[in-house]
Amino acid sequence: MKKRIWPVTIAIALLASVVTFAVLLNVEKNMLSDYERGPVWVLREEMPEGTECTEENVRHYFEQTMVDKGMIPKGNVESPEALVGMRSKVTMPRGCIALESMFTGEKDMLAAMNAPVIAGCKAEDLYQLVSGTLRKGDRIHLYTVNEELGETLLLWENVLVYEVFDSAGKVIDSTDGETAAARINIVLEKEDAEIFYGELYRGSLRVVKVC
């Protein structure tokens, strides 16, 4: 009778060993995965709010580094080139991991508006037009001046410059830093367009470019 018990005992022991070995392998795998590293993009230096990401500066502002995968947040930027044409929503310190939610682009601005329309005007009609250096994608603040009261009031902030044209009516490329803007198109809410043209007619509009 005892001879029959030994094979069963050995089989159970072997099975227990196999199960234990499998469990240990799984635990080891999970422990190692906790220390696996992955790439993220971080800021080389502080990026002020409203900074535009361009093909020229993305590699200057961002550098890739490896961190534990458990530290990689959701929505992290996978490629700086994907940010070209976008602007920072907030000021980001050096060493900050770049997240997609920290940047906004033209599509985001248009999506946030109720009824966006394009309003156009001659550059000369906008007093102090930053020496004609406005370009597509720039943001501007528009002010009105009440000469009688001597007051300057902010009408709209962070207005998107939709397109810029030279004196021949040709679109000026964003990389062109020399050609003076002769005409610009901006994006406003439909309800603000009438006010815009009224202030434009009065010659009371002032422009400040968001740096």
Image: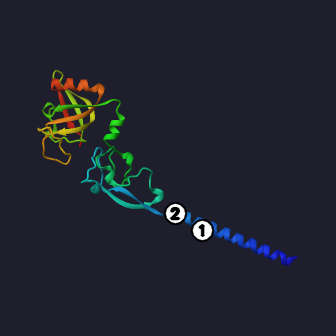
Quarter occupied by residue 117 = top left
Q: Residue 183: horizontal and vertical position, in percent?
A: 16, 35
Task: Please identify the residue farthest to the left as the structure is shown.
Answer: 167
Instruction: Give the colour scheme shown.
Output: rainbow
What label does residue 33 carry, if any?
A: 2
User: Mark 1 is on which residue type?
Assistant: Leu
Horizontal arrangement in the rendering, residue 142 relative to residue 15 (left or right): left
For the residues labelled 2 and 1, the Cα–Cα distance comes to 12 Å
Q: Residue 61: horizontal and vertical position, in percent?
A: 29, 54
User: Mark 2 is on which residue type?
Assistant: Ser
In the rendered view, would you say 55 is above or below 129? below
What label does residue 25 carry, if any?
A: 1
Q: Residue at x 28, y 49 (%)?
A: 53
Task: Please identify the residue farthest to the bottom as the structure is shown.
Answer: 3
Quarter occupied by residue 6 = bottom right
Camera-nearest residue between 6 and 142:
6
Horizontal arrangement in the rendering, residue 150 relative to residue 59 (left or right): left
